[in-house]
Image: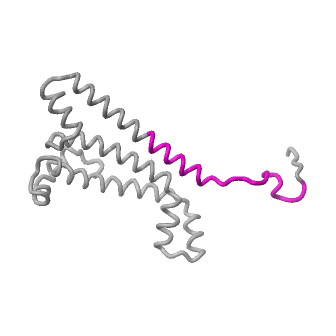
Amino acid sequence: MRAFPFVILMIVLMPLTRAIVGTSFGPLAASVSLSIAASFYFARLVEQNLNEVPKGVIEAAQAMGAKPLTIVFKVLVNEARAGLILSITILLIAILGESAAAGLIGGGGIGDLGIRYGHQRYMPDVMAEVVALLSLIVIVIQSAGNYLSAKQTNARQPTRSIPFYAVGGGDTKHEAV
């Protein structure tokens, strides 16, 4: 569904949207299309992150007798947490862009403002402000996602309490090889 253009998806889903919420126009109608598009996209992002977890970690959990649900929720999700945060960041930015496109069916919000005033009424200053505001929101979302992901990555780094060369034995001298 990710490769499916969102504007086309909104049009294709109009009968379903009308059946679910009683209308195919307005913010409530746009939320149906946004939810469907976001769910498929989120599933793909989660799949990619879970596939990046090293197979050895899963095998170790299985060797210790972990049940499948334990492996999923305590091993896979924990190992993929930083990547999942970045994926949610990407998803939020994509939803922001798609919600701007939802202004075409009266979805309201910033996109609707840009379409109605900036484009249809030929007010380039409004369009420029909408683009600047959307860009600022994207920067804030991306910065927050990067910060949270880095925080998760740093929290998982082991701390060394003893020098690496002292681990092997009593001799703390190391020689150049």
Viewer-side residue, 49 vs 29: 29
The quarter of the displayed image where residue 60 is located: bottom right
Q: Residue at x 56, y 73 (%)?
A: 62
* 26 relative to 68, above or below: above
Q: Is residue 110 left or right of residue 146?
A: left
- Does the magenta run of residues contain 147? yes
For the record, the magenta segment spans 143-171
Q: Residue at x 33, y 52 (%)?
A: 41
Residue 6 in picture, x, y percent from top left: 23, 45
Viewer-side residue, 22 vs 83: 22
Query: What scheme was used to colour the molecule?
Result: one colour
Residue 141 in picture, x, y percent from top left: 39, 41
Q: Is residue 32 left or right of residue 62?
A: left
Viewer-side residue, 100 vs 62: 100
Q: Is residue 147 left or right of residue 19?
A: right
The quarter of the displayed image where residue 35 is located: bottom left
Q: Residue at x 89, y 58 (%)?
A: 170
- Does the magenta run of residues contain 154? yes
Residue 159 in picture, x, y percent from top left: 69, 53
Residue 48 in picture, x, y percent from top left: 43, 55
Q: Residue at x 60, y 75 (%)?
A: 64
Viewer-side residue, 13 vs 115: 115
Q: Is residue 163 left or right of residue 60?
A: right
- Tell me how many marks there are: 0
